[in-house]
């Protein structure tokens, strides 16, 4: 089964990359109030069980994919 | 057994200051030895461990994140738990934070630019094996070269670390947006330290500064003490 993890800088955490992106968008004339830049991880898992997948991905995020000090994560499992 | 204490320098794919670290350690009295990241153990005689600078695993995901899961890190963790001195320099500092052997995390520089120059750092605490050859308030000139050196922790953690003397080095000026200008921290027991500046590049006055030798020589002292404390 396929799943996607969205990793974002936590609210309140300074995101210089997002600031630079927002600044560039403004320079291009877009009416942007702010931008935050995170990361997307697309996964292909062996299991077809949504709950098993969620639990496993949660552990992946805690162990490696995200740093809880500065990042939050959101898990999207296909078909859920 | 030689008179020189053995100091293990861990080599990850992408480490690039491993040889400089080994040379510098040799210049202050250590017998350096390289340990590949896939090793499951450290040499029995090792009295200290250095995680060198570089770009382990291409800095993929987050700097130091992948290296923190390398097989050798279990041995480093165990060595640290026994009180063994562990020093992480630059990428090594990032690895130790990602491994949660040190508090906080290193984030991209505030200015989003790689910074490469001599930095002046102030010694904040000498109550640890790494800075006992320095005095509080002493300023050291040690080069920095990093793109992800902005140390961060939440405010509560930061205050607690400062109160406990775990913030051991601060930049004399804002170098990278690091919280509180933090350049180096130690763990709660004081035997694990990470810093962004490169002491191994500052061991000879001909290259601008020998201040880094104070730190590395102290690590060698600690390696000797460790070997006496934990006979093998």
Image: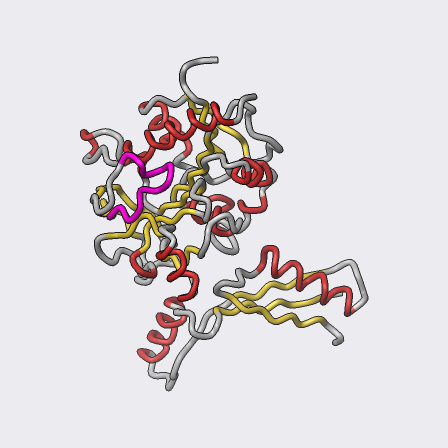
The image quadrant that residue A24 belongs to is bottom left
Q: Residue drawn 48% across and 44% down? A: B56
Q: Residue furthest top?
A: B1
Of residues A10 and B126, the one nearer the viewer is B126
- Residue B155 in view, yes or no: yes
Of residues B228 and A19, the one nearer the viewer is B228
Coordinates of residue B152 in the picture (x, y in percent)? 40, 60
B55 with respect to A44 (left or right): left
B95 with respect to B29 (left or right): right
Coordinates of residue B147 in the picture (x, y in percent)? 36, 53
Q: Residue drawn 33% across and 75% down? A: A23
Q: Residue furthest bottom?
A: A31
Q: How is the image coloured?
A: secondary structure
The image quadrant that residue B173 belongs to is bottom left
Q: Residue drawn 54% across and 32% down? A: B36
The vertical placement of B104 against A20, above or below, is: above
The image quadrant that residue B52 belongs to is top left
Coordinates of residue B141 in the picture (x, y in percent)? 22, 42
Residue B193 highlighted magenta (yes or no): no
Q: Is the magenta stretch mostly helix, strand or loop?
A: loop
Q: Residue drawn 76% across and 75% down? A: A79
The magenta-colored residue range is B122-133
Q: Residue furthest right?
A: A48
B141 with respect to A40 (left or right): left
B92 with respect to A7 (left or right): left
Image quadrant for the C terminus of chain B? top right
């Amino acid at each position: 089964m396929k799943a996607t993890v969205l990793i974002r800088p936590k609210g309140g955490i300074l995101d210089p990359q997002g600031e630079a992106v927002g600044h560039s968008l403004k320079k291009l004339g877009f009416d942007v109030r702010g931008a935050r830049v995170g990361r997307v991880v697309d996964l292909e898992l062996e299991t077809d069980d949504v709950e098993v997948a969620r639990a496993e991905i949660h552990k992946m995020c805690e162990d490696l994919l995200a740093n809880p000090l500065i990042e939050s994560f959101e898990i999207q499992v296909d078909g859920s | 057994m030689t008179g020189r204490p053995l100091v293990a320098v861990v080599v990850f794919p992408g480490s690039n200051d491993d040889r400089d670290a080994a040379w510098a350690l040799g210049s202050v009295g250590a017998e350096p030895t390289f340990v590949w990241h896939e090793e499951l153990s450290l040499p029995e005689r090792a009295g200290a461990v250095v995680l060198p600078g570089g770009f382990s695993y291409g800095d993929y995901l987050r700097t130091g994140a992948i290296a923190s899961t390398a097989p050798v890190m279990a041995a480093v963790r165990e060595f640290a738990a026994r009180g063994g001195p562990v020093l992480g320099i630059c990428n090594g500092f990032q690895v130790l934070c990602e491994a949660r052997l040190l508090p906080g995390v290193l984030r991209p520089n505030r200015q989003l630019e790689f910074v490469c120059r001599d930095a002046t750092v102030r010694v904040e605490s000498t109550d640890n094996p790494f800075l006992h050859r320095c005095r509080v308030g002493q300023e050291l000139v040690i080069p920095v070269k990093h793109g992800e050196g902005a140390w961060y922790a939440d405010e509560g953690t930061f205050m607690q670390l400062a109160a406990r003397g775990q913030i051991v080095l601060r930049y004399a000026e804002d170098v990278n947006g690091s919280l509180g200008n933090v350049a180096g921290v130690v763990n709660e027991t004081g035997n694990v330290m990470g810093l962004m500046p490169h002491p191994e590049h500052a061991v000879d006055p001909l290259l601008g500064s020998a201040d880094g030798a104070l730190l590395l020589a102290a690590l060698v002292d600690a390696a000797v003490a460790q070997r006496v404390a934990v006979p093998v």
